Image (cartoon, rainbow, N blue to C red):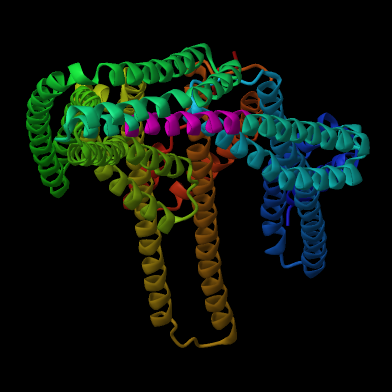
Amino acid sequence: MPQQEQQDFMESLEEALSWMQSTQERLRANDNTEGPRDALEKRLRETERIHHSEHEGRVKIDMAMVAAEHLLQSQDEELKNHTLGKLRELKTQWEETSTYIIHCHSRIEWVWLHWSEYLKAYEEFELWLTRQQRALALGVELQVGLKEKLWQVDQQMVVLSDIQSQAGLLERLLDEANALYTRTQDPSVDQQAQERMQADYNDVRDQAEERLSRLKKIAEEHQTYQGCVQRFQSWLLSKTRELTELMEKDDPAENKLRALKALDDSVASEEKTLLHIESLAEGVRANTSPVGAEQVVEEAEELRLGWQRLRQGLCEAEEGLRASLDSHCQYMSRCRRLGEDITRLRSLLQGLELELEEGRQAGGTEEQMVGQWRTYTGVKSTLVGEESQVEHLKAQLKELFRFSEDSRHLSDDVLAVVKEHQSVKCRATRLCSESESGLRTALQDPLHFYSQWSLQVSQVLEAEVTDFSHIAMLVQKIERLLVDSADLQERLGQLQVKGDLLDSVFGRDRADSLQTELVAAVRNRELLHSQLLQRKSRLQGLISRTKDFSDAHELISLRLAGLRDRLGTADGLQPDILAKKSQADQFRMKVHSSEENIEEHESFHDSLLNLEKWMMIMRQKLESFTVRLESGAWRAGSRAEVQQQKALGEFPEKELQLQRTEAQGRSVLQKTSEEGKVHILGTWRGSERPGCPSTT
């Protein structure tokens, strides 16, 4: 074999071994997990760069193996054995280096990720702890009434429960911090930091327990007061009813006067209970908001006024007999009006319930979902508008309670219709929310489909071509993606004209954001569609050129077989030894020349395919560099610029390879028929040379 091929192999071998040696030295310099997180992250970034440069090492290994192929075809067994030994040594060294790259990077990455997860959980815990400290630093907010105070107690119990539930998270954080300190020895996770975290949690928990105890005491005090008020109100109501029943009896006037005197003495003796309630009211008022305190004062005053009115009523009982008759007429009139209002509202609720049921049975298509959502929204709005009527019913019932007649039957009717209103409202709210959620999902589906499609397109555009079957498979994928692109174009176009619906469902801000995403998706789909068409055209051209060359190779093989047949027929008997030797020498010279022509043609074909593959990969890189430059994402010193400089460094070597291939091509053309020359020239001229990208 020529000395040049041996020299090329040794140079590529030395270059690959040198690269692996320098890579191992870089790995050994960074194979350490101790120290602060910034230093760990720097080592991680360095091992990541080493890991990313593994492709560069693979290229150098491949170059050495390609250079060894010609040596392995040599007839020199010593050279072949020496070359095989070097290749085995190279492969062993490469496997060790590749394994070391993966293990070193994975080990440092694991510690860094573990630390990152700990910091994320720690920051969330610190944020939660800060919120709790700020909340506990605020004074207890005074509430309006007993219901709000009980709700405040429940809320504080939930807060305390949440604080207590964080104990498990704190324990895990402390364990994680201890494990990290064991690996990194970083002071940010040492024992002192762990103790400080535990102390802050204990302080928050103790403050929450103290606040809960205070809130319970305030609520119990208000509950005691409220019970006394309700009992006194019931007592007032019972005495009022007793007075009414007394006045409704048919007893003589003297008997009614004696009964009124006894009832008045009983009412007067309860003033001490009223004074006790007023004393409790003072304590409750101090722990109640201004609005609630005013209500407490008014409530206590109302009790005294009620008591005074009862006594006044006892004094005016005789005059009130006639007034009671008028009052009864007024009571019946209000009962009739209240009953009519209840019937009207119940009828309306039944109609709305029917609308909800009919809307629930609809659905399926997007238009039906929109109609369903509008139905639910309309029912919900109607129910919100009827809340004033519900409050009016309650007010009417409250007015009836001022009369002495029994209003329990109307009270039950009012309570039933109020519950029915609340039930229908809750159902409408739930259905409206579910419908709106489904509608949002349906409206955003084209954008989700675009994201999946664009990801598949990017994978296809970035895929490297390895052989003919791979090219055909890529063409089939591209054709399927082009069909999906047409469907995606139609769906995105339909979504663009639904601006009003998007505003109604998502709100103005979110709808504007979706419109922005939609415009970007439409533009990017067109760009990716164009790139798919270009990629498909190039791949089909490559398939055509490869097929033409295969046909030419098959034709040459057929002609060689025919030549061998003709030689067989020319193998006639010779008269003497000299003639027979001459005939044998002629056969060998013909055969040897044909084999050399075939080898030269095959070598030219391999070189041409290698150049076309390299040009296709380089063209994809140049297109990505151009996109970065046009989008403004190019930065000096970035990874993209390093890749660009690396790509530029390949051009001189490929230029020499191109010149060698051109020389091979001229020699092959001289030994090929006119029909074969047409195919070879067409294949050669179809190979385009990529231009160099701008380095600015």
Task: Please tell me how many numbered marks the rendered image carries.
Answer: 0
Residue 633: x and y, percent? Answer: 54, 19
Please check the rendered image and state whether residue 219 is part of the magenta-colored stretch, yes or no: yes
Which is more toward the observer, 260 or 9?
Answer: 260
Query: Image quadrant of residue 485?
Result: top left
* Left or right relative to 650: residue 260: left
Where residue 668 sits: x, y (%)? 48, 49
In the rendered image, which quarter contains the N terminus? bottom right
- Classified by dominant secondary structure, the portion drawn in magenta counts as helix
Q: Residue at x 49, y 31 (%)?
A: 228
Residue 283, quarter of the rendered image: top right
| Residue placed most toward the observer, 275 or 463 | 275
Q: Nearer the viewer, residue 64 or 535?
A: 535
Region of the chain picked out in magenta, as a range: 218-238
Residue 490: tell me if it is visible: yes
Q: Could you tell me residue 253's position as x and y percent?
A: 19, 27
Q: Nearer the viewer, residue 310 or 636?
A: 310
Q: What residue is drawn where x is 45% and y is 52%?
A: 671
Describe residue 235's horizontal placement relative to residue 5 as left or right.
left
Where in the figure is residue 320, as x and y percent of width and height? 19, 19
Q: Within the magenta stretch, is there residue 286?
A: no
Does 438 sit above or below residue 214?
A: below
